[in-house]
Image: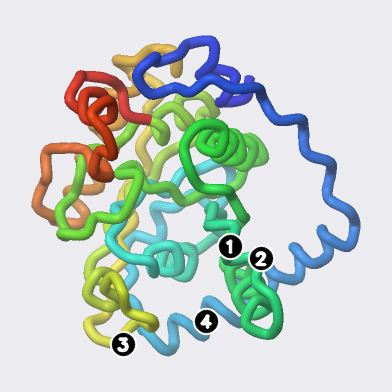
């Protein structure tokens, strides 16, 4: 069952929007598949080694990433370059979703952006709430059902103060729904190497990427159980905290409420996906 359909059947009225499912996507044309295969080769043969040579990331625990099968690399999130550091450090191809605007540019700059993000395993997604969020969840589920490795941030968005925020339950739901193992990842120094607002990462300090031991969350219960999702999420975040060493924020990383209704919703207890 697609993730978005599951959410509609087991809705959380405080967080789940209504909406009709989008029609199934058409299969990729042969030329699209060829371009995708070329980009994957470009990533493994050129982009990743070049980035490692220039920025010399310190990589720990690569042996903890399963070589085959569905796996979720669940990481803390402090900088734009987190989505580059993880694929570069991983011993296998990692897939993640990136803003569709990175793929829609024109001219030489647009081509370079599109080629680079495709090469490092990114797929375009329309960001936002409502149907866009459900579509992104479905995309991740499809990737995992194909046996791929995907990178996700349980905090939901970047930490601007360096603290580790509470995890949202979407990652745990995907792991419980698909049976994928979760490899916790601790990123250290990415916020210093490329702070918010910087146009290019710095070579110093060197970024450290720590892959923890895989977590099997299946014993927490089914994906339909809110308690199972919460317990699995807390276990994943505890492992990330042990790897990153960040100060715990103890709250969710949420954008400022835009109106009184949003403030009420944030204040009331409800599941954050």
| In-front residue for pair 4/144 | 4
Q: Give yes or no for contact between labels 2 and 1 (Cβ–Cβ under 8 Å).
A: yes
Taking the spot 31% from the left edge, 87% from the top edge, the residue there is 203
10 Å neighbourhood of mark 1: few (<14), some, or many (≥20)? some
Looking at the rendering, which quadrant does residue 80 occupy? bottom left
Label ID, residue 169? none
Q: Give yes or no for contact between labels 4 and 3 (Cβ–Cβ under 8 Å).
A: no
Taking the spot 22% from the left edge, 82% from the top edge, the residue there is 205
Would residue 248 be seen by someone viewing this image from the given angle?
yes
Label ID, residue 203? 3
Q: Above or below — where is 268 with respect to 107?
A: above
Q: Where's the C terminus, which quadrant?
A: top left
Looking at the rendering, which quadrant does residue 46 occupy? bottom right
Would residue 42 be seen by someone viewing this image from the given angle?
no
Q: Which residue is mark 4?
A: 49
Label 1, label 3: how many angstroms apart (C-alpha)?
A: 27 Å
| In-front residue for pair 202/264 | 264
10 Å neighbourhood of mark 4: few (<14), some, or many (≥20)? some
Instruction: Pinpoint residue 82: horizontal percent, then vertical percent.
Output: 38, 64
Color theme of the render = rainbow
Q: Above or below — where is 155 with respect to 210?
A: above
Which one is closest to the eye, mark 1 or mark 3?
1
In the drawing, does residue 121 fall left or right of residue 83?
Answer: right
Taking the spot 70% from the left edge, 30% from the top edge, the residue there is 22
Label 2, label 4: how many angstroms apart (C-alpha)?
A: 26 Å
């Amino acid at each position: 069952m697609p993730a978005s359909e599951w959410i509609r059947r087991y809705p959380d009225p405080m967080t789940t929007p209504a909406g009709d499912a989008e029609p199934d996507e058409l299969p990729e044309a042969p030329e699209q598949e060829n371009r995708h295969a070329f980009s994957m080769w470009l990533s493994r043969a050129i982009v990743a080694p070049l980035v490692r040579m220039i920025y010399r990331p310190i990589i720990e625990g690569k042996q903890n990433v399963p070589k085959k099968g569905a796996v979720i690399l669940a990481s803390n999130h402090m900088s734009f370059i987190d989505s580059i550091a993880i694929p570069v450090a991983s011993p296998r191809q990692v897939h993640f979703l990136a803003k569709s605007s990175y793929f829609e540019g024109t001219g030489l700059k647009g081509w370079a952006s599109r080629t680079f993000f495709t090469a490092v395993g990114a797929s375009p997604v329309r960001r936002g709430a409502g149907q866009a969020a459900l579509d992104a969840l479905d995309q991740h589920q499809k990737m995992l059902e194909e046996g791929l490795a995907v990178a996700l941030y349980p905090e939901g968005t970047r930490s601007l103060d360096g603290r580790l925020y509470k995890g949202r339950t979407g990652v745990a739901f995907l792991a419980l729904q698909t049976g994928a193992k979760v490899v916790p990842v601790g990123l250290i120094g990415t916020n210093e190497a490329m702070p918010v607002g910087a146009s290019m990462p710095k070579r110093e300090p060197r970024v450290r990427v720590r892959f923890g031991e895989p977590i099997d969350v299946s014993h927490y219960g089914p994906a339909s159980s809110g308690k199972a999702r919460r317990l699995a999420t807390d276990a994943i975040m505890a492992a990330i905290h042990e790897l990153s060493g960040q100060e715990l924020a103890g709250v969710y990383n949420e954008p400022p409420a835009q109106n009184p209704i949003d403030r009420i919703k944030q204040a009331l207890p409800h599941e954050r996906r």
